[in-house]
Amino acid sequence: MKRTKMQAAVVGGTPEDIEQAFYEALHNADIEQLMACWAEEDDIVCVHPGGGRMIGAGAIRATFEAMFNNGSVQAFPERMHKIQSLTSAVHHLVERVEVITPQGARQAYVIATNVYHQTPQGWRMVAHHASPGTPKDAADVGVKPTVLH
């Protein structure tokens, strides 16, 4: 039996594979694919822009189901900054979200942090925290640290 790209990403893969599957699930309003990206732990957490903290798979699933009742979410991860160790990975990024308004298509920006842990089932998301952003967030701000000797 041939495995699909999503099955391969969910069974093992890398944090990047799970992240790609997560954003594909948003684009397709696919709740099963989206929930397959999350770890099977009681303390997984999700915060949407301007929203409260949801803890646990049931609360997370309910909020995404409600979002998908209004259609898919066209969020595109950009400007990614990654930190990874043997068993955890943190991806800080800007989500460019395409929003349809009465005036036509518009872009909104969200600042997001996705946290992944290595589990017995492979890499899985354990936290997604998103905050409202601005068009300025499309570019990195700050300077790279320098080392003085």
Image (cartoon, helix red, strand yellow):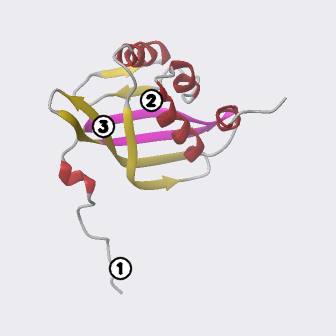
Question: Left or right: where does residue 44 sit relative to residue 2?
Answer: left
x and y percent of residue 32 in the render? 56, 19
Q: Quick check: 135 above or below 149?
A: above
Which disc, if any, is residue 26?
A: 2
User: Judging from the image, what secondary structure is the residue with disc 1 in?
Assistant: loop
- Which amino acid type corresponds to the residue marked 2 in the rendered image? Leu
User: Judging from the image, what secondary structure is the residue with disc 2 in?
Assistant: helix
Earlier residue among tags 3 and 1? 3
The boundaries of the magenta stretch are: 111-131
x and y percent of residue 3 in the render? 76, 33
Question: Left or right: where does residue 85 sit relative to residue 68?
Answer: right
Residue at 56%, 53% in the rendered image: 85
Whole-number angstrom distance, CA of label 2 to CA of label 3:
12 Å
Whole-number angstrom distance, CA of label 3 to CA of label 1:
39 Å
User: Judging from the image, what secondary structure is the residue with disc 3 in?
Assistant: strand
Residue at 64%, 33% in the rendered image: 6
The one of 6 and 55 positioned closer to us in this rendering: 6
Residue at 22%, 43% in the rendered image: 133
Disc 3: which residue = 98
Earlier residue among tags 2 and 1? 2
What quarter of the picture does the N terminus occupy? top right
Q: In front of the other: label 2 or label 3?
A: 3
Which disc, if any, is residue 147?
A: 1
Tell me the crowding category of disc 2: few under 14, some 14 to 19, or many 20 or more residues within 10 angstroms, Cα based: many
Q: Quadrant of residue 97?
A: top left
- Which amino acid type corresponds to the residue marked 1 in the rendered image? Val
Q: In front of the other: label 3 or label 1?
A: 3
The one of 134 and 72 positioned closer to us in this rendering: 72
x and y percent of residue 98 in the render? 30, 37
